[in-house]
Amino acid sequence: MPREEESDFRRAAELQPRNVNIIYHLGMLCERQDRIREAMQFFNEAIEIDSKFAPVYHARGMIYDKQENYQASYIEFSKAIELDASSAVSYHNRACSLKNMGRYEEAVADFLRSLELDPSNPLTYANIAIVYRRLEKYETAIDYFTKEI
């Protein structure tokens, strides 16, 4: 199915080469197949078409996160948030980048904002609990761990 899906998107891109959604989805297909360099080329092309398309910055942030390049992922998630401040996932992922860089207080703020936007994500509760534990705020960590359950 992925090859057929990719073939369909490539045909669509031939018909609509300036369609940011098509180019973005080609990048996502490549990313899922661990063709990272090609995915980044599609994401960069999507930004050239529409520099205000927030999902592409989020996708690049996820790639940088997998590569453990947390500063770059932080920058990409920040751009995604700048363009779409209603994305709980972007706040969550930027908080994870901050957590991985040891910037715990900033991570807490982003996790809390993510929970304001989506209070039903158990992963956010778990991650904020981990950060509070690292900050040695054990009671607060326990509170968030139990909310996650």
Image (cartoon, helix red, strand yellow):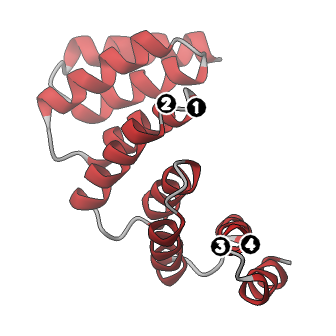
Mark found first going from the N terminus, 1 or 3: 1
Q: Which mark is residue 63?
A: 2
Residue 50 position (above or below residue 97) = above
Q: Is residue 66 left or right of residue 110?
A: right
Label 4–label 2 contact, CB within 8 A: no
Q: What's the residue type where badge 2 is placed?
A: Ile
**Quadrant of the frame with the C terminus:** bottom right
For image coordinates 52% across by 62% down, the residue present is 92
Q: Which residue is mark 1?
A: 66
Q: Position of residue 58 (x, y in %)?
A: 39, 44
Q: Position of residue 99 (x, y in %)?
A: 56, 56
Label 1–label 2 contact, CB within 8 A: yes
For image coordinates 31% across by 26% down, the residue present is 43
**How far apart are the alpha carbons under marks 3 and 2?**
28 Å
Residue 92 position (above or below residue 68) = below
**How far apart are the alpha carbons under marks 1 and 2?**
5 Å
Q: What's the residue type where badge 3 is placed?
A: Leu
Residue 140 vs residue 42, the one in the foreground: 140
Label 3–label 4 contact, CB within 8 A: yes
Q: Which residue is mark 3?
A: 135
For image coordinates 50% across by 50% down, the residue present is 97
Mark found first going from the N terminus, 4 or 1: 1
**Mark 1 against mark 3, which lies toward the viewer?**
3
Mark found first going from the N terminus, 4 or 2: 2
